[in-house]
Amino acid sequence: MPDSASTSENRPLRIGVLGCGPVAQAAHFEACRKAENAELYALCDAADDLRERMAAVHQPKAQYASYNEMLADPAVDAVIVATADAFHIPAARKAIAANKHVLVEKPLGTNLGACIDLRDRLSETGLTLQVGHMKRFDPGIAFARRFIQERLGEMFAFKAWYADSTHRYDMTDATQPVIKESTQAKTPAEDPKADLATYYLRAHGSHLFDTARFLGGPIEAVRARHTEKAGPHCWFIEVAFANGTLGHLDLTVAVRMDWDEGFRIYGEQGSVLGKTFNPWYFKASEVECFSEEDGEYHRPLGADAHFYRRQVEGFASTILNGASLQGTSIDEGIDVVRAMIATARSVDSGRWIDLDDVDGTL
Ligand SMILES: NC(=O)c1ccc[n+]([C@@H]2O[C@H](COP(=O)([O-])OP(=O)(O)OC[C@H]3O[C@@H](n4cnc5c(N)ncnc54)[C@H](O)[C@@H]3O)[C@@H](O)[C@H]2O)c1
């Protein structure tokens, strides 16, 4: 194995970030710099103005206009793929071919066949691939998951909702750094926002399905309705979980009020109630878990809620120390892609769609 993937020495993981767009500027650069076991070693963007500005601010050891050149740098252990959705799979495939570990932004991909092909290629390597569903690193959601595993007993009902807010940019502009844009940025041939329903399902639905998968377990089938009435897009999605739990998801973009995201889960020995905040507040979900065993509600303070930094630290500790993957695996990322495609197919047909039966692109 070349040096780049061999990280047994006691040193931080050297990360190269592909893409200097909004998510890298608002999350990944700082996450890598603050992580206790990783460093922002390199950044890469085809847009010279963006890359040079970000390099001046974050001072990586190296900067590249060419992704191939960053991948050829033996000092890079791992890459974060922070590009438009359509580039995720090709960029992750190249990283694996260059023997680099990968943290790829959500959703894993847009085409199911290409996601499966990536899994096949990954399985022939000893590399780590994690999908950037960072809500798993929300300490409130992680607490809910532990309660479900240890104290809930059999789960029978699961409801979750995710409603973006029409006022979100007032909120995010207040907390994010000033985002630099560039006319030189590399963009997909097809405008991702040309079909807004598909764009919302991918951008927001991917988070909702990952949370459902994380807390409720594998999903077998969905039946979905969609409306675009008075502007907003709204999906009501019935979910059949493999463990027999009845599920319901509500995805709305956007509600005329504050951000509204959460979950309600009922089980044999308790219940879990969760309220999740706009991620750019870096505030842990407020979670209350009632246990029949002691007759008490349990409510954590998730003080350290830099999901993106915690995500990088989890990724790095898997690679450096062999810790089990805390984030979304490639199989789970594929499940999310399947669930999104199944939702779109069900909207079209009005039928229940088995996740195993879907194919194609979203
Ligand atoms: N997890 C989250 O909370 C969250 C939030 C926002 C966005 N995202 C995801 O992050 C991803 C990126 O979003 P964005 O808005 O920052 O994207 P963007 O398209 O605005 O920026 C990506 C940058 O990557 C560069 N780039 C792309 N391919 C390149 C290549 N081969 N070589 C060199 N440079 C290249 C582009 O020039 C561009 O500047 C999306 O998939 C989105 O879904 C996640």
Image (cartoon, rainbow, N blue to C red):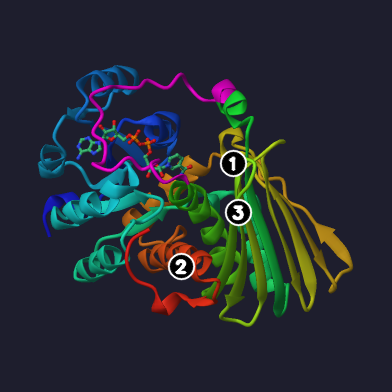
| Image position, residue 357 (x, y; %) | 40, 79
Which quadrant contains ligand 1? Answer: top left
Q: Amino acid at mark 1?
A: Ala
Quickly name the residue at label 2: 345
Cα–Cα gap, marks 1 and 3: 34 Å
Q: Residue at horizontal 59%, vertical 76%?
A: 241
The magenta segment is 173-196
Q: Residue at horizontal 38%, vertical 66%?
A: 334
How crowded is the residue under tag 3: few (<14 C-alpha within 10 Å), some, or many (20+)? some
Residues 226 and 283: in front is: 226
Q: Say whether residue 195 is magenta.
A: yes
Q: Residue at horizontal 17%, vertical 49%?
A: 4
Relative to 189, 150 lies left or right: right
Q: Say whether residue 300 is magenta.
A: no
| Image position, residue 39 (x, y; %) | 33, 36
Is residue 277 placed above or below 61 in the rendered structure?
Answer: below
Q: Amino acid at mark 2?
A: Arg
